[in-house]
Image (spheres, coloured by chain):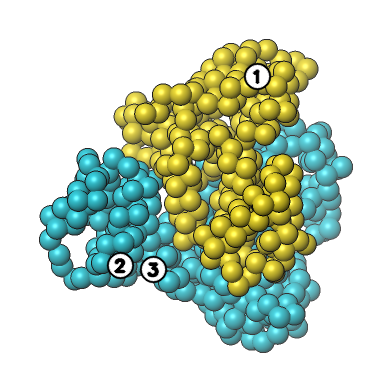
Chain colours: A cyan, B yellow
Amino acid sequence: MSISLSNICKSYKKVKAVQNISFDVNPGELFGLIGPDGAGKTTIFRILTTLLIPDEGTATVAGFDVVKDYKAIRKSVGYMPGRFSLYQDLTVEENLTFFATIFRTTIEENYDLIEDIYVQIEPFKDRRAGKLSGGMKQKLALCCALIHKPKVLFLDEPTTGVDPVSRKEFWEMLKRLQKKEITILVSTPYMDEAALCDRIALIQDGEILDIDTPEAIVSKFPKTIYNLGANNMYKLIQSLQSYEHKYSVFPFGEFVHYTDKRDSFEVANLISYLEKAGLTDISVEVGQPNIEDAFMELAK
Amino acid sequence: MKTENVIEADQLTKTFGGFTAVNAITFEVKKGEIFGFLGANGAGKTTAMKMLIGISKPSSGTAKVAGFDVYTQTESIKKNIGYMSQKFALYDDLTVKENITFFGGIYGLSRTKIKEKREQLVSELGLENISNKLVGSLPLGWKQKLSFSVSLLHEPKIVFLDEPTGGVDPITRRQFWEMIYKAADQGTTIFVTTHYMDEAEYCDRVSIMVEGKIEALDTPKKLKEQFKADSMSQVFLKLARNIE
């Protein structure tokens, strides 16, 4: 196992940040921790990168114990924290040289690992890190986390607040890194990114809701989802909320995802109910659940 | 129905030195509309929004917000709009009630009105048990919902939401959108930026900014047809990539 957690617990004063967290990440796997703010993602990262000692439980990274062997772990992992934490008043190149030197290596030695990413920021290598755009900062931080050729890479919300184009490019970079035999643990609040991981853990309020491949998590969704549309979204939601047979009602883009309490029912009855409520242009079709549907069902 | 324009921008431009952050954008937003304002990081969204809310003077072009001029009537604009962002929402070290009272005062509501709004808001959001708790101790999702309600305290014509749902769990995110639908249904215009492309599909119309210009503006349905895409995410990627 590249990463292994067994019954990890951590509290801050009265707040239980994470409770009984156990999971394993295989070598070379791209594993995602998916959950909203406050779920406990950062606490798990800080424990695994030896910056925080767990209250209970054990964990290993690259075969080393996170408490006893913390020095060995620090040499073998790369960590990109959620908040930009490079030196703002050093240039791009100076930051990279600095991190290489700390890990007793040089930019040249592992250049093949970062080349792909570094060429995109190289034109700005004399610019101070503080003056870079969000997307470029993120690329520089990834280069710095990789410069010592880590066995395991920790990326805490690398794409939060980043626009969809840069997010897509970032995930393409991760897929290429994965081919170079680096194990990657990445966290994100964006449910659509879950589908890009080999396996994911859905996490909320410090507890894991499920761990599996994205496909398997979706296939476990217990209900049939109906995509409903109508002339007035707000009225449609209100009407469905007060429908006696409704199980769940969630807006999803241009449609509402609706599930029913009953195992089978006549769609025509639902339509006539909505028509009586004054709605027009009603459309109903069976839809596919996605990770977000699964998350909301598990989080109930 | 939706005929009255509450935002009208014509050739609105902002330059910083030799750099054109917002390049001659022209659009209008109708009363009660949910208008999505999208763009990549650095596309000029924030600069454009700052001009519309009256805190940054345009370099050229004209715009009216709630009927007031963005050059000469910025104080009237501020009284007629609400604003909420992910970064600054409420004061963490004031209680729920104190925040409502404080912002009510800022917006110039009378004591009676504040009291009435405070009770209404606390009961609508189901915050009775925690109305005397510090806002800092609430989960993010509650803060965001409360913050949205506070931005509506003075019954503004338009509310500007700058990435209101970042990091919020999926259930709360949907409850938040239900609140947006409700406000729009009651005639409030919603002007919203977001990085969640599925949220773009909740909007009546969406504009996409690329390098300072509005490159697309239509209903999500028509944009998907125009760009032969299945989702707004694909529309966004096609637009932003083609320009490069």
Q: Quadrant of the N terminus of chain B?
A: top left
Name the kind of residue labelled 2 in the image. Tyr
The answer to which quarter of the image holds residue A297 is bottom left
Q: Which mark is residue B48?
A: none
Left or right: residue B184 versus residue B14 is: left
Q: Same chain for the residues at labels 2 and 3, yes or no?
A: yes
- Dot 2 or dot 3, earlier in sequence: 2
Disc 2: which residue: A247
| Mark 1 and mark 3 residues within 8 Å of each other at the beta carbon | no
Disc 3: which residue: A297
Where is residue A274? Give x, y as percent. 22, 52
Q: Nearer the viewer, residue A32 or B16?
A: B16
Name the kind of residue labelled 3 in the image. Glu
* Disc 2 from disc 3: Cα separation: 10 Å
Where is residue B142? Give x, y as percent. 59, 61
Q: Residue at x 59, y 49 (%)?
A: B148
Q: How many residues crowd mark 3 within 10 Å: few (<14), some (14–19), many (20+)?
A: some
